[in-house]
Image: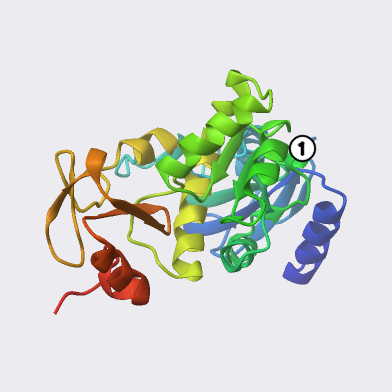
Amino acid sequence: MTHEDLLDLARDLNQRQQPYALITVVRAIAPTSAYPGAQAIVLSDGTLHGWIGGGCAKDVVIGAARQAIVNGTPKLLRISNDRLESDSDVEQHSMSCASNGTIELFIQPYGPRSAICVLGDTPAAEEARFLAERLRIRLVDSPDSAPIVLIATQGQGDEEALERALLSRAEHVLMIASRKKADRLREIMRARGVSAEQINRLVAPVGPDAGARTPQEIAMVSIVGVMAYQRGRAERLANAQPVAATVGKKFINPVCGMAIDIATAKHVETLNGVDYYFCCDGCLTTFRQNPAKYAIGAPRN
């Protein structure tokens, strides 16, 4: 099959929501009939379309691809008898051909587990959908059709979107919101009769604390969070040290530089998932007039 044929097949499988894995040869060391850039598609029943080398590697590739389809996790695969450097993120297999040779392949699964549902009509939601498509993460309209829901309502129908997501079959519900806002929404969900088990699926904030400010930056950070859950690395993300302007239980007022006691702060302002605490009306007003100047991560003069 040509690359165009494979793309046509992939589009058809996506439209019919049938799972498959796209395999690409990324490295080939002679003697082997495989070559870098060769591609194939493996269906969930083990049918292979395309070319990734001779029969010596076919069974191994099909088996690894079917496992990736089930897990929804991409992987690097190496088939070789040479004593190459061992990599923890590479799945190693022996080459059965007498001629030896080495093939390295990247396996990218597509299907229900690689899909996300983005709720919201905000600029950040649109940017998240754009990035998902660029990363070949399948977008679906219903929370019941994806394992991960990303809520990017940002004040526009938060409660309705969150309740819809929590009552769906989605495994993880990620929301662009500060911790304080998320806690308030959890209380609202409890009052609406949503169970504790369902509420526990809510994750907010989403992704690493990178000082994101613009819709594009917020969407990028959020998609990183989505990928962490897709690839089983959410725990590492949760254990990452956040970037914050806090000292103990105090927050450094970004306008005047005073250390504010979080528990007794006069004003709290949330910007892009980060809570800012202020000691007086004047600092809050100054911040609101030019928030980009004082946001965490902004350059200081």
Which residue reaches farthest front? Answer: 281
Question: Horizontal placement of 291 versus 300: left or right?
Answer: right
Report x, y in % for residue 144. 77, 37
Question: Horizontal placement of 158 versus 182: left or right?
Answer: right
Foreground residue among 164 and 60: 164
Rendered position, 127 above or below 183: below
How packed mark 1 is, by other alpha carbons closer than 10 Å (few <14, some 14-19, many 20 or more), is some
**Any part of residue 101 in sight:** no
Report x, y in % for residue 116. 66, 48
Which residue reaches farthest bottom? Answer: 301
Foreground residue among 85 and 124: 124
Rendered position, 130 above or below 39: below
What residue is pinned by disc 1?
A: 144
- The residue at 82%/59% (across/down) is 9
- The residue at 64%/54% (across/down) is 137
**Any part of residue 171 in sight:** yes
* Secondary structure at numbered mark 1: helix
